[in-house]
Each structure stands twice: as structure tokens, then as C-alpha cells.
Amino acid sequence: MSYKAVGGQAVIEGVMMQGDKKKAVAVRTPDGEIKVKTERINSWVRNKHIDKIPFLRGMFILFETMIDGMKSLNYSSDIYMEETGEEEEDAIDRFIKKMFGDKANDVLIMVSMVIAVILSVGLFVMLPTFAGGFFAKFINNDVVLNLIEGVIRILILFAYIYAISKNKDIERVYQYHGAEHKSIHCYESGKELTVENAREFKRLHPRCGTNFLFIVMATSIILFAFFGWPNPLMRILMRIVCIPVVAGIAYEIIRILGKYDNAFTRMIAYPGMMLQYLTTKEPDDEQLEVAIASLKAVL
């Protein structure tokens, strides 16, 4: 059966699904209603045909996806707070709205992304390279030192994902993440999109962002091994400069994993698939219903 390529993201008490031309966010309100917001996709990357350029497209698509993800999270948060009566603006929100008016939400998204990037660089670039530098006192092999740094980076990723999974709110998001995967599997199998059918499928998916994260880590280990082991400042600068290259390579790999199913692609996808046991949880029927409502809205 031929099907349209779809992807998604878990949000607060809901799921965002994106197809070729439309995207939708479905959110379960506290009174049990499912609110669905659908809109046509206006992609700068697609309009400029950057999505047709292998390796270059990865970084741009990742950046655009982050923006769309932030918007979907903000929408689901607004719906939840409106329905629970918890929407109270703090001083920072009021200041930004006063300064930027209708553009306030866009500014908040950009500020959130900048903060996220800074924290990511600190956690996954600076900390591993400084920690790896400790071993340079005992090891005089650039490849081994880069390998150690990469392993530290992956361990930090595992620890971070495991730690936040213990938060009850994050656990709910992970359940919706599982519901997203199950509903997409159901659709791609050709079965009717029902809760009963979706329930049968696994909560893991090879095109998941978790897979992408692991492939980014693995790609960085291989790539950085070619740059030797210079001083800490040069290591950090090189790793930041290489982020677009790593993202570009990882994106092409994740496309291949989603397109082909054979022993080789399953072997490459295996570590990221196992990591999804941390980033997804088994959803209940109501969460599956939300994911299916979002998916149906974009088909």
C-alpha cells in the first residue's frame, strides 16, 4: 500500500502530526474533549527547494522542525492552561508582550531556542570535551581520546533522558510519544485507524527523533576522530562549526532507515530504537484516540 509520509511529535496532553501539505495538533482538554488545530504547511526550506539538496538540507530541516515543534508545544500549553484556569502571565511575559505586541510569541520561541542551543552546547559539547581531556594525561592517542569523548557524550544523553523521564509530566508526554508511533505504524500497515488496531503495534519507530539524536552522536564520534586532539578551545570551536555537517549526515542516514527495512538498516537503527524505550511509554486508549485524531486531520 502506498501512503503519504507522516511524522509527529508529542506535546502537552496531545500530539502534533505533520504530512506533506498539512499539520495538526490534537490536545485532550481536562473535560475530555479533543481540540484539533489544522493548518497548511508553509515551509521556507521547501519553497527554496533546499529539501532537494542532500546533506545541506539536514541542518535547515532540523532548524525548521525545532521552530514548528516549539509552536506546537506553546499551543498545547496555552490550551491546557486556558482549560484549567492556570493562565497567569508573569512579569517577563507582560514585558515581552508590551515590547513586541503581536510578535511576542515568535520572540518567546526564538529566545527559548537560543537558550536550548546554549544549554545543549554546554551539556553535549563543552562538558564531554573537558571530561575527555582528563584522559589525555594518560592516553597519547587522538582517535582513542575522541572515542572516549564520544562515549561520554552518549552517556550524558542517556543520563539526561533517564532523569527527565522520572518527572510525571514528562512521563505523560512520553506516553503521547508512544501513541504517536503506534498510530503511524497502524497507518503505514494499511489497517484502519482505530484505537483497537493501533494498540497492537510497537511504540518504537525508526524515523523517531530519538534515533536521530543517537545517530548524531555516533556520526560526531567518527567525524571528530579526523580532527586530532587540539587544545580545549579549538576542540569546542571545531565541534560547534561541525554541527551542520553532523546534522546533514545524520539526516540522510535517518531517511535511509525510514525508507529501507533490511538487516543492515535494522542494525544501524538498533541502538536508537532501544533508546526509545526511555523516550516512549505505553499509551492508554484515550491517548491513542488523540494521536489518531491528529493523524486523521493531516491525511
Image (spheres, grey):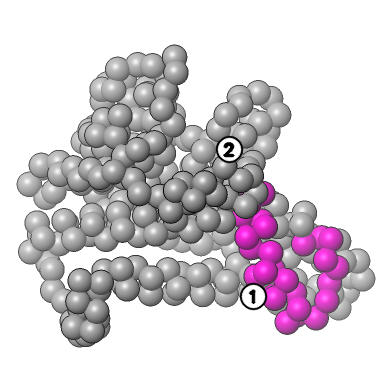
Quadrant of the image containing the C terminus: top left
Q: Name the front one of labels 2 and 1.
A: 2
Residue 255, label in figure: 2
**Residue 181 appears in the rendering:** no
Q: Residue at x 57, y 29 (%)?
A: 259
Disc 2 to disc 1, how far (Cα)?
29 Å
Q: Residue at x 61, y 46 (%)?
A: 53
**Residue 3 appears in the rendering:** yes
Left-right relation of 196 to 89: right
Tell me where residue 233 sits by quadrant: bottom right
Left-right relation of 235 to 79: right
Q: Earlier in the sequence, mark 2 or mark 1?
A: 1
Left-right relation of 216 to 172: right
- Residue situated furthest front in the rendering: 48
* Amino acid carrying mark 2 in the image: Arg
Residue 126, label in figure: 1
Q: Secondary structure at mark 2?
A: helix
Is 97 one of the magenta-colored residues? no
Residue 258, label in figure: none
Can you give x and y, in whole percent of width and height, for residue 239 in the image?
69, 68
Q: Residues within 10 Å of mark 2 (few under 14, many from 20)?
A: few
Q: Nearer the viewer, residue 34 or 242?
A: 242
Can you give x and y, in whole percent of width and height, for residue 240 in the image?
65, 70
Are the residues tagged 2 and 1 within 8 Å (C-beta)?
no
Asked if 168 appears above or below 286 in the picture, the reply is below
Magenta region, mostly helix, strand or loop? helix
Is 226 one of the magenta-colored residues? yes
Q: Secondary structure at mark 1?
A: helix
Which portion, as a residue range, is magenta? 224-249
Tell me where residue 146 sits by quadrant: bottom right
Q: Nearer the viewer, residue 194 or 134?
A: 194
Can you give x and y, in whole percent of width and height, for residue 12 in the image?
27, 53
